[in-house]
Image (cartoon, grey):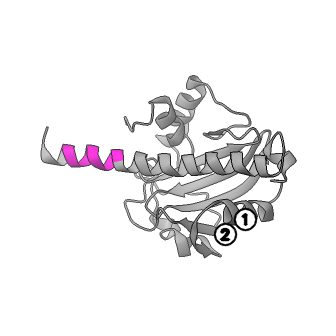
């Protein structure tokens, strides 16, 4: 292997490691939230509005910075690209964003759809580049049952559902940012694309 290939492989592993850390933090926080509220699911525990999402983040995460708009915690919205090089769209720049102690920037957005409760935009290295969906920026969803998966109305998604999202959204869409996280889950926490 050439030096650039080795560096690229190392960088991909670094991104996935950082993503896995955020995933684990959300999973642990969801369990603690349910346990603290003695509830059988997140809705019963009270996670039912954007304000409750902010309360959840501030209580169960080590937040080092809270931002009133997107560009304060993330890079400028117009700098984000998809894997195919097109501009990524669909940012809500007025939803609060946060920087965690790991350096990851998150934008949790209450978007109840079926059992899906929160869309979580994650930039694993905050404002630093490359700012490409599927490399350092991902969309994860927290479901009512505490499962974290790609975007859908119920979870867990099947391997086929995740693959369909990957090929239909992550690889070629500029209208959304889903599909890449599910591919990493399917490939056992490796970035194979």
The local crowd at label 1, few if under 14, some if 14 to 19, many if 20 or more residues have their Cα within 10 Å, is some
Assign the magenta stretch its main secondary structure.
helix
The magenta region covers: 5-13
The residue singled out by tag 2 in the image is 96
The quadrant the C terminus occupies is top left
Decide whether residue 191 is among the magenta residues.
Answer: no
Work out whether residue 74 can be spotted.
yes
Dot 1 corresponds to which residue? 54
Label 1 near label 2: C-beta < 8 Å? yes
Q: What element carries label 1?
A: helix
Which residue lies at the image location 39% right of the left edge and 66% below the top edge?
Answer: 128
Residue 63 vs 46, above or below: the answer is: below
- Residue at 77% over, 41% down: 144
Which of disc 1 and disc 2 is earlier in sequence?
1
Q: Quadrant of residue 150?
A: top right
Front position in the image: 154 or 63: 63
**Secondary element at image label 2:** loop
Counting from the top left corner in percent of width and height, residue 56 is at 72, 60
Q: Does residue 11 show up magenta in the picture?
A: yes
In the displayed structure, 159 sits above or below 142; it is above
């Amino acid at each position: 292997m050439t030096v650039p290939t080795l560096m690229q492989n190392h960088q991909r592993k670094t991104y996935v490691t950082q993503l896995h850390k955020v995933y684990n933090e959300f999973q642990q926080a969801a369990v603690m939230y349910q346990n603290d509220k003695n509830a059988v699911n997140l809705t019963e525990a009270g996670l039912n509005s954007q304000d409750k999402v902010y309360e959840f983040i501030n209580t169960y995460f080590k937040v080092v910075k809270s931002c009133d708009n997107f560009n304060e915690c993330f890079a400028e919205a117009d700098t984000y690209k998809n894997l195919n090089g097109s501009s990524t769209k669909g940012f809500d720049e007025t939803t609060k964003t946060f920087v965690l102690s790991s350096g990851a920037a998150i934008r949790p957005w209450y978007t109840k759809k079926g059992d899906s409760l929160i869309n979580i935009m994650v930039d694993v290295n905050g404002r630093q580049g490359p700012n490409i969906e599927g490399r350092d920026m991902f969309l994860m969803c927290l479901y009512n049952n505490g499962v974290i998966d790609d975007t859908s109305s119920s979870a867990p998604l099947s391997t086929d559902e995740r693959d369909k999202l990957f090929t239909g959204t992550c690889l070629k869409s500029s209208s959304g940012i889903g599909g890449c996280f599910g591919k990493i889950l399917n490939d056992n926490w490796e970035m194979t694309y």
